[in-house]
Every structure is written in structure tokens, then in C-alpha cells.
């Protein structure tokens, strides 16, 4: 398989636009979209049969040995290294993380601990769970740039106390694109009796994943970003001893019916993005998943080198912490505020036809480059040149 811009034929992306923002909302391959549409067509031919019998088995279906949701989730479980019994499909990572946060038996004075590298929406969700229970959200500052992955483990370990009831940690941070050592974090937390919830939004399809081998308690992730499922689609994994306390964030017919029933027998919605997830996984396997990872990780590391050298900005992140995305500091002269980031991002899109993530953080601008198999070195060069022209 030859990766690079020739792979764009598998997507509906505008070939005239340099798309370096795959990590934000994903981009679904044509073949997976066709599979999703075929599922929708099948659903509309027999809506009640599809939704009430075959989807989650609310009514008998002697013509099938397993529900459609179970068949799809079993494929996902095999891909991420999980037992089928421990994994459920959810609309997105935010739903999965909220399920855990709102199910935690917190009391006044308890603490949820997160780092300041966490995704903003999940920080808000953890804060809301604390507000309801009287618990406290403790945000740990992480020095940046991170020179060693162990520094993150040490920062979290130092911040824990007898009041810490949950640690929430990213596997790949959204803004800084760091691959964090979640297994080491889990070991340190468990040594102190503290459970760990992982935000794996950017991991499936972008990094090799053996979720059961990480030693964490709960793991939620998206499949519509890097695993090529239609959006939106994700999963929640829970260790067997951690499943009983979980409840779906929106109460429906599955309430108190067990882990699988509660998360599968939910309010009516189009389930085809979940059911088409195995098609995205099949594509990754056909293309050679290990080869995909090697290409994407190599391109991301190369992008960091090229951009930092061209712009004269420091990039000091260890290679071991780089996955399929990389976040590079931009020249100080381009600004430092959210408004500056928004203006530059729009200018790059309109004037240069480059779509890339840009944000303001810690008094400067940063760009996060996503390296997908349809990108190549010329895309990075286009970005480097477009920004250099503005200096």
C-alpha cells in the first residue's frame, strides 16, 4: 500500500484543500459511508424489525443468534484488545466519560484529579459532577514542554491525597497531542487505592491499543476520528469489577438492567454509525494497520521537525510521546490570544486552502497537525511556507 495524497480517492475530502485536521472530527472513508447508507436502507425497509428486534433484542428474533449491536461491539472489542463483555458502544467519548463521572459515588470533600492538559469539555463534565456532589475538582499543573513521560506520572502522584477518589487522564492529549503513559499512571494510582478513568478520544486507529492490558478502570474513546467509523461513534470499556455502578447518562428503558442492557437499550437514535464501525476497522486491516501507524507517526514527527526549523520555534517533545498528531509552537510575532488564533486559522483556510487546528495556550499560538495516510510531506511544506510568508 502506498500512502500519501493518492489515498484521498478513498475520502470525499476536497482535493484542493490541504487537510491537516483529521483529529478534530475525523473524516469517514467512502466505503464506510456506503456501508452506513446500506444499513439505513435496510432499517427503513423494516423499521420496527430492525430497531426493536435486531438492534438490541427488545423483542424475539429467531432468525438471528446475536443482536446487531453485539455483533458490532464484538468487532470493536477485538480491535482494541477487550473482552466483548467489558465493552459497550456509545455515541462518543464524551458520553462514555460522563457515564463514569456521573456514576461515581462522590461525597462532599472528595476530589477528582485531572491535569491542565485535559480536554476542556471533560474538565467541565468533571466540574459538574463535583458541583452536584460537593466534591472538589483538583487540577494538576504539568510543566511544558514535557521532557520525559515520567514527569506526568510524578506530577499526578504528588497531587494525590486521601481525598482523591478518581483520577481522569488523557491517553493522547487534545491540545498538546502528547501520548501519555496511562499504564504507569494507573499503576501509581492503584498503589494508593485510586481508580483511573482514561479519555482515549484520539487513540483507536491512531495508536496500537490493548485496553485490557493498561490496568485502568474505565476507558472511553472515539471511533469516528482515527478508526474511520461514521460520526459519531465511540465505546466505553469498564473493568469487570467496575461495571455494576455504571449508568447511562440519559435514563431510558435499560435503567438498572445490567451493563450491556443499560447502554444498549437507550432512547431512539440512528444506530448506523455504531453498526458501521467494523467497516472502518476492516479498512485499517486491509491497508495494514501497523503500516498505517508507522506512516502516520513518522509523518507527524517529520512535521514537528520541519515546522519548528522553518519557523525558528523550539520543539522538545520526546519521540516516544508523539503519535499521529503533533503540536508545534508558532512564532511569537503571530500573536498570543484566542482571537489571534481564530484570525490566522481563517486566513490559512481562505487564502491558502489549508485546514489545520490552531489555538492559543500559555501566551502563544500553537498548531496541531494531524498526520493521516492521505497526507504527505508536501502538505507540511505548504503549511510551513504559508505561515513563513506571514512573518
Image (cartoon, rainbow, N blue to C red):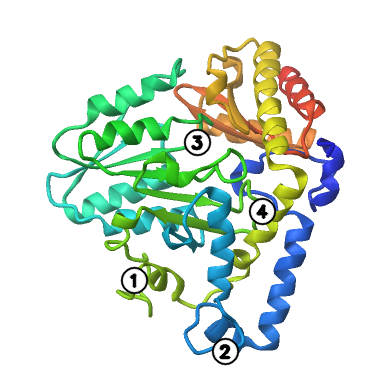
Asked if the residue at tag 2 contacts the one at tag 4, i.e. Cβ–Cβ closer than 8 Å, the answer is no
Q: Which residue is mark 3?
A: 172
Going from N to C along the chain, the mark reached first, 3 or 2, is: 2
Q: Residues within 10 Å of mark 4 (few under 14, many from 20)?
A: many
Q: Residues within 10 Å of mark 1 (few under 14, many from 20)?
A: some
Going from N to C along the chain, the mark reached first, 3 or 4, is: 3
Asked if the residue at tag 4 contacts the one at tag 3, i.e. Cβ–Cβ closer than 8 Å, the answer is no
Going from N to C along the chain, the mark reached first, 1 or 4, is: 1
Q: Which residue is mark 4?
A: 281
Q: Position of residue 139 (x, y in %)?
A: 29, 34
- Foreground: disc 3 or disc 2: 2
- Foreground: disc 3 or disc 1: 1
- Foreground: disc 4 or disc 2: 2
Q: Position of residue 284 (x, y in %)?
A: 70, 48
Which residue is found at the position 30% from the left and 74% from the top? 256
Q: Is residue 76 left or right of residue 158?
A: right
Q: Secondary structure at mark 4?
A: helix
The Cα–Cα distance between marks 3 and 4, rounded to whole angstroms, is: 20 Å
Q: Is residue 381 left or right of residue 215?
A: right
Choose top left, top right, bottom left or bottom right for residue 290. top right
Q: Position of residue 384 (x, y in %)?
A: 73, 21
Asked if the residue at tag 2 contacts the one at tag 1, i.e. Cβ–Cβ closer than 8 Å, the answer is no
The Cα–Cα distance between marks 1 and 4, rounded to whole angstroms, is: 27 Å
Q: Which residue is mark 2?
A: 62
Q: Residues within 10 Å of mark 3 (few under 14, many from 20)?
A: many
Q: Is residue 172 left or right of residue 32?
A: left
Q: Which mark is residue 98?
A: none
The Cα–Cα distance between marks 3 and 1, rounded to whole angstroms, is: 30 Å
Q: Position of residue 114 (x, y in %)?
A: 32, 37
Q: Is residue 224 above or below residue 207?
A: below
Q: Which residue is mark 1?
A: 258
Q: Is residue 132 above or below residue 120?
A: below
Amino acid at each position: 500500500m502506498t500512502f500519501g495524497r493518492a489515498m484521498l480517492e478513498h475520502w470525499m475530502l476536497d482535493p484542493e484543500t490541504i487537510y491537516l485536521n483529521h483529529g478534530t472530527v475525523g473524516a469517514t472513508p467512502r466505503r464506510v459511508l456506503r456501508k452506513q447508507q446500506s444499513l439505513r436502507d435496510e432499517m427503513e425497509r423494516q423499521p420496527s424489525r430492525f430497531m426493536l428486534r435486531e438492534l438490541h433484542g427488545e423483542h424475539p428474533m429467531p432468525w438471528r443468534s446475536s443482536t446487531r449491536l453485539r455483533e458490532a461491539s464484538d468487532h470493536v472489542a477485538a480491535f482494541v484488545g477487550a473482552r466483548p463483555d467489558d465493552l459497550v458502544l456509545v455515541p462518543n467519548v464524551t458520553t462514555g466519560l460522563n457515564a463514569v463521572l456521573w456514576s461515581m459515588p462522590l461525597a462532599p470533600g472528595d476530589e477528582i484529579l485531572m491535569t491542565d492538559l485535559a480536554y476542556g469539555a471533560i474538565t467541565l463534565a468533571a466540574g459538574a459532577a463535583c458541583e452536584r456532589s460537593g466534591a472538589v475538582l483538583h487540577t494538576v499543573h504539568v510543566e511544558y514542554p514535557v521532557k520525559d513521560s515520567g514527569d506526568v506520572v510524578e506530577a499526578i502522584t504528588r497531587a494525590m491525597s486521601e481525598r482523591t477518589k478518581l483520577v481522569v487522564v488523557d491517553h493522547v492529549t487534545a491540545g498538546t497531542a502528547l501520548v501519555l503513559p496511562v499504564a504507569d499512571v494507573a499503576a501509581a494510582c492503584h498503589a494508593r487505592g485510586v481508580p483511573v478513568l482514561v479519555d482515549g478520544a484520539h487513540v483507536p486507529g491512531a495508536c496500537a491499543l490493548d485496553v485490557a492490558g493498561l490496568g485502568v478502570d474505565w476507558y472511553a474513546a472515539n471511533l469516528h476520528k482515527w478508526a474511520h467509523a461514521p460520526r459519531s461513534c465511540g465505546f466505553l470499556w469498564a473493568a469487570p469489577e467496575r461495571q455494576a455502578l455504571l449508568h447511562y447518562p440519559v435514563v431510558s428503558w435499560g435503567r438498572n438492567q445490567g451493563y450491556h442492557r443499560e447502554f444498549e437499550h437507550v432512547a431512539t437514535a440512528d444506530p448506523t454509525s455504531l453498526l458501521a464501525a467494523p467497516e472502518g476497522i476492516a479498512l485499517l486491516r486491509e491497508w495494514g494497520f501497523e503500516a498505517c501507524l508507522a506512516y502516520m507517526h513518522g509523518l507527524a514527527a517529520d512535521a514537528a521537525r520541519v515546522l519548528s526549523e522553518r519557523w525558528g520555534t523550539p520543539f522538545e517533545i520526546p519521540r516516544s510521546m508523539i503519535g499521529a498528531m503533533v503540536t508545534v509552537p508558532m512564532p511569537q510575532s503571530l500573536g498570543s490570544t484566542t482571537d489571534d488564533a481564530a484570525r490566522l486559522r481563517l486566513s490559512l483556510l481562505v487564502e491558502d486552502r489549508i485546514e489545520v487546528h490552531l489555538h492559543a495556550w500559555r501566551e502563544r499560538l500553537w498548531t496541531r497537525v494531524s498526520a493521516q495516510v492521505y497526507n504527505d510531506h508536501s502538505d507540511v511544506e505548504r503549511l510551513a511556507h504559508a505561515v513563513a510568508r506571514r512573518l
